């Protein structure tokens, strides 16, 4: 008779549901008996143009050095990131994806009984990571799917360790502006770390300035990623920007080689490739407008997006997901976000966007 493993494991892990990722193309192809190239995935907010060609070149070169441990200090990449934002190298923390930074902050600061604050429809990983450390998540209502920063500041308790602001948020695509952020920051006490998750920052035309709070030495961490506009999601590399006193704590919480050498090389080349980012922004702007205009024509409610995806109300989201999948179009159902009537569709190339809309019309019997 095996012992009940929950006598030994952290009791709070029992309620932890693992993250539900977008369905992979290869797996879908196998299940449907289709060729992978006949399937489109507009489910994980990936860059439809792929990585920067310069990043690919740098990664190929780095492969030749795969037998050598990477630069654990991430010297070149952290220096380049710091220069880009007028900060020092000590202000930059590399992560195995920006998602790892969320965990590292948890390692540094969360105890059972603490709480973290997030918006009701915020990115789920904040809550998953809080649960991992036995902390509670206070979910603050977000009317119209927009973070209500005043209500989030009101929700702070003496046990609050972290507040997450996803800007723009995933899966809603909504943005909070400079004025709200400044008003919020004026109210946040020092015992709370404010985490601005800016994974889609590069898609914004006029992004709010949060880096000034790093310069001022406030307890903030800004998270950015190479997974989205840079098209390097598979590499698992992202970064945090924080004042040195806070960055030093977070650095102690990571494994020595958490950012691998191929990822560091690809990320550095991608970071410097402004042309590829500009092209991606253009493709995204055009595709997002097309998707939103199409939803409007179809009479579907959607949330106007500041990012590279759109949240749209389709009725039974699980059914629409399944029927789209059967037709070779992978989107994301939103039941795990307590939005069973909604799906999230990433902006693809115009060919992909047109196919996605045509398939959606078919599935909703609008065609
Ligand atoms: C995609 C995404 C990230 C990026 O995660 P990585 O671990 O860097 O791939 C972070 N935050 C949000 C809100 C996202 O949507």
Image: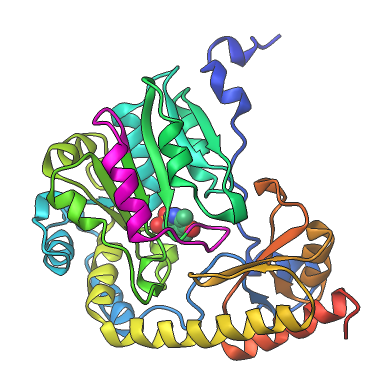
Tell me where residue 312 sits by quadrant: bottom right
* 220 sits left or right of 73 in the view: right
**For this rendering, which residue is in front, 253 or 274?**
274
Image color mode: rainbow
214 drawn magenta: no
Above or below — where is 146 with respect to 301?
above
Taking the image as drawn, is residue 303 in sight? yes
**The C terminus appears in which quarter of the rendering?**
bottom right
**The N terminus appears in which quarter of the rendering?**
top right
Judged from the image, the quadrant occupied by ligand 1 is bottom left
Q: Position of residue 283 (x, y in %)?
A: 48, 87
Residue at 70 percent across and 46 percent down: it is 338
Q: Position of residue 317 (x, y in %)?
A: 78, 59
Above or below — where is 335 with respect to 112?
below
Above or below — where is 157 with respect to 192?
above
172 drawn magenta: yes
**For this rendering, which residue is in front, 115 or 99?**
115
Name the residue at the left extreme: 88
Q: Position of residue 227 (x, y in %)?
A: 41, 65
Q: Position of residue 363 (x, y in %)?
A: 86, 74
Taking the image as drawn, is residue 37 in sight? no
Report the number of discs.
0
* 230 sits left or right of 117 in the view: left
Residue at 55 percent across and 45 percent down: it is 124
Name the residue at the bottom extreme: 351
Tell me where residue 324 sits by quadrant: bottom right
The range drawn in magenta is 169-193
Name the residue at the right extreme: 365
Residue at 34 percent across and 81 percent down: it is 277
Residue at 38 percent across and 63 percent down: it is 235
């Amino acid at each position: 008779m095996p012992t009940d493993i929950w006598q030994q494991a952290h009791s709070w892990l029992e309620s932890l549901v693992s993250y539900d990722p977008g369905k992979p193309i290869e797996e879908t192809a196998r299940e449907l008996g289709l060729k992978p190239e006949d399937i489109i995935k507009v489910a994980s907010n990936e860059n439809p143009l792929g990585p920067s060609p310069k990043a690919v070149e740098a990664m190929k070169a780095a492969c030749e050095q795969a037998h050598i441990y990477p630069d654990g200090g991430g010297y070149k990449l952290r220096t380049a990131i710091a220069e880009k934002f007028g900060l020092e190298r000590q202000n930059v923390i590399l992560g195995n994806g920006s998602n790892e930074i969320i965990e590292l902050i948890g390692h540094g600061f969360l105890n059972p009984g603490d709480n973290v604050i997030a918006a009701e429809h915020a990115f789920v990983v904040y809550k998953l990571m809080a649960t991992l450390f036995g902390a509670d998540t206070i979910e603050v209502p977000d009317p119209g799917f927009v973070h209500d920063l005043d209500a989030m500041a009101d929700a702070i308790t003496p046990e609050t360790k972290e507040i997450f602001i996803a800007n723009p948020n995933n899966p809603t695509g909504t943005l909070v502006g400079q004025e709200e952020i400044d008003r919020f920051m004026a109210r946040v006490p020092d015992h709370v770390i404010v985490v601005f998750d800016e994974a889609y920052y590069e898609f914004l035309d006029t992004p709010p300035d949060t880096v000034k709070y790093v310069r001022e030495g406030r307890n903030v961490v800004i998270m950015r990623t190479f997974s989205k506009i840079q098209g390097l999601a598979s590499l698992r590399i992202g970064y945090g920007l924080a004042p040195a006193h806070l960055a030093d704590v977070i650095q102690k919480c990571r494994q020595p080689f958490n950012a691998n050498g191929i990822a560091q090389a690809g990320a550095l080349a991608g970071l410097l490739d402004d042309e590829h980012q500009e092209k991606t922004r253009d493709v995204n702007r055009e595709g997002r407008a097309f998707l939103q205009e199409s939803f409007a024509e179809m009479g579907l409610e959607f949330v106007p997006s500041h990012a590279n995806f759109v949240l749209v109300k389709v009725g039974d989201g699980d059914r629409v997901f399944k029927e789209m999948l059967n037709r070779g179009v992978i989107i994301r159902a939103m039941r795990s976000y307590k939005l069973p009537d909604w799906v999230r569709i990433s902006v693809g190339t115009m060919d992909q966007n047109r196919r996605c809309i045509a398939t959606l019309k078919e599935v909703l019997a609008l065609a």
